[in-house]
Image (cartoon, coloured by chain):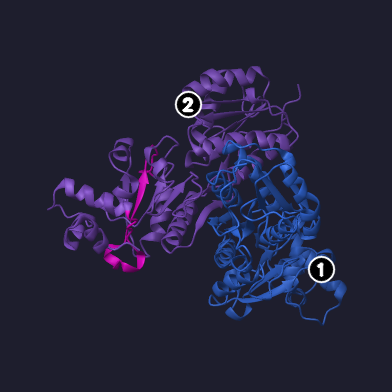
Chain colours: A purple, B blue
Amino acid sequence: MTRMQDIADKLGISKGTVSKALNGTSNISEELQKKILETAIEMGYTKKLRRQKDTERRLCILIADTEYKEPHQFAYDIILGFRQMAEPAGYEVDVVSADDSLQKSLSYDAFMLQNQYMGAFVVGFNLGSPWMEDFHSCRIPAVLYDNYVPANPHIAYVGIDSNEGMELAVSHLKQLGHKNIGYLSSTLGSYVMQVRHKAFFQTLRQAGLSADYARARSAYLISECVERYLPKLLDMGVTAILCSHDQLANAAMLQCQQLGCHIPEDISIIGFDDLPFCAYISPPLTTIRQDRLQLGKSAYYALESLLNQIPIGTLLLHAQLIVRNSTGEVKIK
Amino acid sequence: MTRMQDIADKLGISKGTVSKALNGTSNISEELQKKILETAIEMGYTKKLRRQKDTERRLCILIADTEYKEPHQFAYDIILGFRQMAEPAGYEVDVVSADDSLQKSLSYDAFMLQNQYMGAFVVGFNLGSPWMEDFHSCRIPAVLYDNYVPANPHIAYVGIDSNEGMELAVSHLKQLGHKNIGYLSSTLGSYVMQVRHKAFFQTLRQAGLSADYARARSAYLISECVERYLPKLLDMGVTAILCSHDQLANAAMLQCQQLGCHIPEDISIIGFDDLPFCAYISPPLTTIRQDRLQLGKSAYYALESLLNQIPIGTLLLHAQLIVRNSTGEVKIK
């Protein structure tokens, strides 16, 4: 295990200077601090749990491209669940906006060391986020929400079982008599969207239903998805549409209504996530629930495990089908 | 929530008689006990955690087709890890041999209720085990080692990440220059063997290597695997063989040596599990480690979560590559 003295010896400086750099004191030059950080990372230096006093135990939630400040927003409960576990256990938790410019300015390990964070819970990163590459070889533990990075024992993946969610949705529609099912998805530039896209076809095949690739469409913008692709699905005769997330399902319902289709008489719609608004729209949305509070708590459990050298790799919660009024029996034509 | 009184009302008997049946007292007729148990299951009766006194909190480890009594055997550490967590937390843990005749004699829920177990950790079941069907709809929590049953919130799956293990093994062989890699596997009648078999081909494709189906062979008996299929793989020019578990890898090494092949000069062999013997055979076996003690502890965490209505579905630990002397650089022919 690398100690501060080892770093000092390698650079020919005092241990005190190394300590200053690693503890973020500002009275050394930026250049020297950078050199010390880089050397520390190269030598595999990490802060160890047992060495920290309570006042020094700091974790961060790194968040990008996700709304979390209001109770109705996606990541609010995820963050709440994490804090509800971490803070009583004696950790200080910072929520840090990790935009691309921060990620490009220094490596993940360097950021964590510089800010004295022992571990991170990472929310909202997509496959193109600069630090996703770092997570393949980083030394400081990180738990990734909805992102999977194999073969690094310092990384864990937490989410719900998207395959199970898709299976619940398709099985519900099949029971209602639907055979022609379409899928609308957000861009496939994120891990979880790729998983759900693949799960859609796999589940249809397992259910003995037609799994035509033309029936699944994705786009970065919700407007493009519903204005351009939804009419195409209707033209193909689909009687039900699964959506990769609730906002998209809501937009799809509005678009259907504008096109004169009644829900669920003419077309059934299913969302994914069960955001608070789903119960209040018209008609209330059938969707796949992610228990976001428990996801946050599970993320803390995974991070605490990694900090204690327990090699958790993947922790998935059960998905749950919430049946409301946006799905109904297929109309016999 | 169903109470004993509800069951009594439905059957027109006293609550005391129901209590006797559910608490295993023997002074009621076998026929009546069976009727009460069946009604209790039909009505969704389960023992709740918060109702139990410490002396009444009982869990079981249901084990089939797996050796566990000696420290060198596969499931010893798994069971030890589970007990190391469960017993200090106040649970009594029974290890129960769950052979097919027990499983055929009554349903899983009935067995659990009759014996007053609040939850089970299930080890060594294959896809044909009678209770595997029950796990799709059972009410009493069960954590399955190496078996996945979706869409039942009372079931969780614990194991290591076999995809990651396969990736580590193939990547190691690729770095040593191997391009023609074969796979020998136990029968594909178990979930985890199916996962590893599929992962083998997927990993080869991702690594840009030929993924010829003829290079993967499986058989129920180790002897059939190594006597019949290993020579076929050698004839096809493979320079390395992955094995689905360590005992098979050990038998494959002995067979290679009998055929005059040197390990690792002529052929590299990799196992799976890292059983204690792997370090002591000749040559010591390169293998993928399952941290079995932590797997047992994680299984307890998952079961405790299910008992507390936290819907854990899947918990996978990281696989780890242990490099010993049964793998080496490919010989240039």
**Tag 1, which chain?**
B
Quadrant where the N terminus of chain B sits is bottom right
- Disc 2 residue type? Ile
Residue in the foreground of this view, choosing between A24 and B239: B239
The span shown in magenta is A43-70
Q: Position of residue B112 (x, y in %)?
A: 72, 69
- A63 magenta-colored: yes
Quadrant where the C terminus of chain B sits is top right
**Residue picked out by circle 1:** B102
Which residue is rendered at x = 73% and y = 31% of the image? A209
Circle 1: element type: helix
Could you say which disc has been placed on residue A222 in the image? 2
Q: CA distance from mark 1 to mark 2?
A: 55 Å
Q: Position of residue B267 (x, y in %)?
A: 65, 51
Residue B300: image quadrant is bottom right
- B332 magenta-colored: no
Q: As displayed, is residue A54 above or below residue B191?
A: below
Q: Farthest left residue? A: A27
Which residue is rendered at x = 73% and y = 61% of the image? B125
Q: Is residue A322 visible?
A: no
Q: As displayed, is residue B248 above or below residue B329?
A: below
Residue in the foreground of this view, choosing between B203 and A215: B203
Residue in the foreground of this view, choosing between A107 and B90: A107
Which numbered disc, 1 or 2, marks the residue closer to the eye?
1
How many marks overall?
2
Circle 2: element type: helix
Residue in the foreground of this view, choosing between B253 and B93: B253
